[in-house]
Image: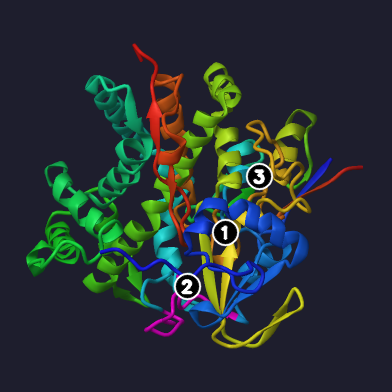
Amino acid sequence: MRIEFDREKCQGHNRCYMLAPDLFDVDDEGYAILRDAGEVPAELERQARLAADNCPEFAVVLVEE
Amino acid sequence: MTLPQRPAVADWATDFDHTHPDYAAAAPEIWDDLREQCPVARTERFGGAWLPVRHADVAAIAHDTEHFTSKAVIVSDFRGLVDAPVGYAPPITSDPPFHQEARRLLLPAFSPKAVALLEPFTRQFCSSLLDGLAASGSRQVDAAVDYAQHIPVQVIAHMLGVPPEDGDRFRVFIHRILEAPGQTGPIEPEDTLTFYLWQLIEQRRTDPGDDLISYLLTTEIEGEPLGPEHIVGTCALLLLAGIDTTWSAIGASIWHLATHPEDRRRLVAEPELVPTAVEEFLRAYAPVTMARLVSEPVEVGGCPMEVDDWVLLPFPAANRDPEVFDRADEVLVDREQNRHLAFGLGIHRCIGSNLARMELTVAVEEWLRRFPEFEVADPEGVRWSTGQVRGPRTLPLRLPEGA
C-alpha cells in the first residue's frame, strides 16, 4: 500500500493527524505534513486507511498494489 | 418581543424558508425529500435564495470563491454592508487574497497542539457543572440550558484571558447578544461587550498574559501591528461563531444519547469509542449551515444563479447524502469512514474545529461518566433552534433516583 498526500487540497481539518499520528504531523498553522510518502509499513496500514477514509477534502489517497 | 409567525411554506422545492419553525422541526426529512426530487431548491424569500442538498453541489460551491463571495454569510433581506475582500468580520466574511492573511494570524491559536493545552481546563469546568447539577438534587435537568451552553462561553472567556472574577459580567454580555438581542432596555456604553474588550486589550498591552488577546497584540498584518478595532472584531467573531454552534453540537449529542439507550450503554461501556461517536454526531447533527452570495453568474445542478442571489450551504444535508455515506440516514457510533463536512470545506473550514471537537468530546465523556443513565423527560419540551445554527435550545432530561 502506498500513501499520497495533496498539500494543495489540505485545509487543516486535522483528521489525519488525529487518526494516523504515526503517518502525519501538523505544522504551526494546522496543515498536515506527511511524515514519509510512499510505501506504508504493514503495521500502519490501518492508520493509513483511517486517514484516507476521513479526509473531508479527499487530500489523502491510498494506492493499493 | 415576539416575532410574527412567518408565512407557511407552500412547497419546499420552490418556496423554502430555513427560518420557519417547520424547518427546525423536520429539516432532515425535508433535505431527504429534496435530494430525491429537486436537489437545488429555490425560494423568492430573502430576495431570492438557493438551497442545494447534495454533497457534490455543496462541496463545489464551498470550493468556488470565483462565483461566490463570503461578504455576507447569514441569509437575511439585507445583503451586507462592508464589501469583500475584508468584510465586517474577517476572516469569515473575507474573500481571497486578503482572507488568507487574516486567517493565518489566527490559525496557530487553533491548531490541534494549541487546543490540547485547553483540555484540562475544559474537563475541570464540565466536571464542576455536573457537580452543581448532581448537588441540586433535582431529578430533572435541562442539558441544553444548564450544561451545554455554558461550556463554550467559559472556554472562550478562558482563551481570551477574561479574569474569573469578570465571568458573570461576561456571561451577561453573551446572553444579551445571543439570546435577547434588543430586549434588555437601554444599556450604558460602559456596560457593553465592546467597551469591556477594549479595556481588556489596553490592560493586556501593559501586562501581557498567556491568552489570545496578548497573542494578537504581538501579531502584524502587512507589517503593521493589529489595531484594537481589528482585535475587538476578531474577539466578537470568535464569540459569535464559537458559542451557539458548539452549544448546539453538545446538546444534539446528548439528545441522541437520551433517545438511543443502546448507543448510550455502548459508549458507557467503551469510552474509548467516544471520539469516533462524536464525529458521527457531528455528521448526523451538524449544527451549521453557511451561506454565500453569488458574485458572478453560474449554474449549479442545472440551476442558473444570478448575482446577489443567496446560496445556503447546508452541511448537515450534504452529510446525509447516500452518494457519499453508507447508511446515510442511520447514526452509527462506530462509523469508521466519515468524511463529514460539519466544519465546512475549502478555505473557510471552521477555524475553531479542533476546539469544538475537544469541547464536544470532553462534554460527552464527562456527562456519561457522571450520568450513565438518563432519558428525555418531556419530548414536547425539546425545542430546536431555527435558522442557520441548528441544535436543541431546551432539552429537559430525567435522571434516575440516586444519580
Residue B151 quadrant? top left
Q: Amino acid at mark 2?
A: Val
Are tags 2 and 3 found on a single chain?
no
Q: Secondary structure at mark 1?
A: loop
For marks 1 and 3, give the CA distance. 26 Å
Most foreground residue, B367 or B200: B367
Rendered position, B26 above or below B69:
above
Residue at (17, 45) in percent of width and height: B167
Magenta-colored stretch includes residue B323: no
Q: Position of residue B24 (x, y in %)?
A: 50, 55
Front position among marks 1 and 3: 1
Q: Is residue B203 left or right of residue B33?
A: left
| Distance of label 2 from label 3 (alpha carbons) | 42 Å
- For the residues carrying marks 2 and 1, which lies nearer the camera in this image? 2
Say which element carries label 3: loop
State which mark lies toward you, 2 or 3.
2
Please give the residue where the numbered disc 3 appears in the rendered image.
A35
Quadrant of image for the C terminus of chain B: top left
Q: Which residues are magenta?
A: B68-86
Q: Nearer the viewer, residue B15 or B285?
A: B15
Where is mark 2, residue-wise? B75
Which amino acid does the dot numbered 1 rest on? Gly
Name the residue carrying label 1: B344
Residue B53 in the image: state x and y as whole percent: 67, 62
